[in-house]
Image (cartoon, grey):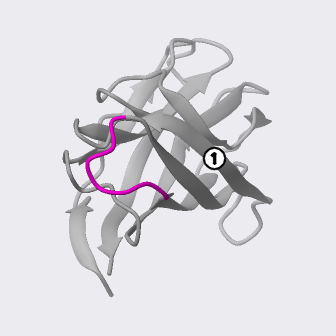
Amino acid sequence: MGKLINVRTSDGTAHTNSTTEAVLDSVTIKAGTLQAGKVLRFRGKIRATATNSTDTLTVNASVHTSAATGGTAVGTSGAVDVADNDVVYYDIDLIPQSAAGSSAGTIEVHGTMSAPGAEGTATTRVVHQALSSINYLADQYFVISADWSVASASNSCVAESQVAEELI
């Protein structure tokens, strides 16, 4: 068990009727937190609360310099035709590789992110890559965003849960 950074205790803002990627959840990684020897773990769940026909949902995880879409991608669910109550789970570790105080540090990313699916049946995707030129001296953000393939008032998804912790 580590030090809790953030816990979502209620549903976030729904992303509905739009094909513009929107932030569902974000966690601030305070300046100075990133340093070799630490691990930051992010786990959570996104639910498609309502869906239309064969429209697809894509959920993305990224590290960014603000709580906005874009940034450096660390994982994706892939675009999948969803049904009501399908979920995307993520369990992603950020492992800083550089000494504290680096203005161009490296972070190893390991974990899993599921494609949307019924609880217990979603296909899991492995997340593994290295991020470079991450400024450890500035706030960074772990961002979960989503995008619908078609704008429909019947398409809606929401961040239902999230736990972020610094493992020691």
Q: Amino acid at mark 1?
A: Ala
Where is residue 140 shown, x and y percent of the image?
30, 38
For the C terminus, the quadrant is bottom left
**Residue picked out by circle 1:** 130
The structure residue drawn at horizontal position 57% and vertical position 12%, both measured from the top left corner, is: 19
Residue 42 seen by the camera: yes
Horizontally, is 54 left or right of 63 in the view?
right
Where is residue 91 shown, x and y percent of the image?
55, 64
- Main SS of the magenta part reads loop
Viewer-closest of 61 and 85: 61
Above-or-below relation of 155 to 161: above
Horizontally, is 117 left or right of 51 in the view?
right
In magenta, the rendered stretch is 97-103
Above-or-below relation of 135 to 142: above
Where is residue 144 shown, x and y percent of the image?
45, 40
Residue 50 seen by the camera: no
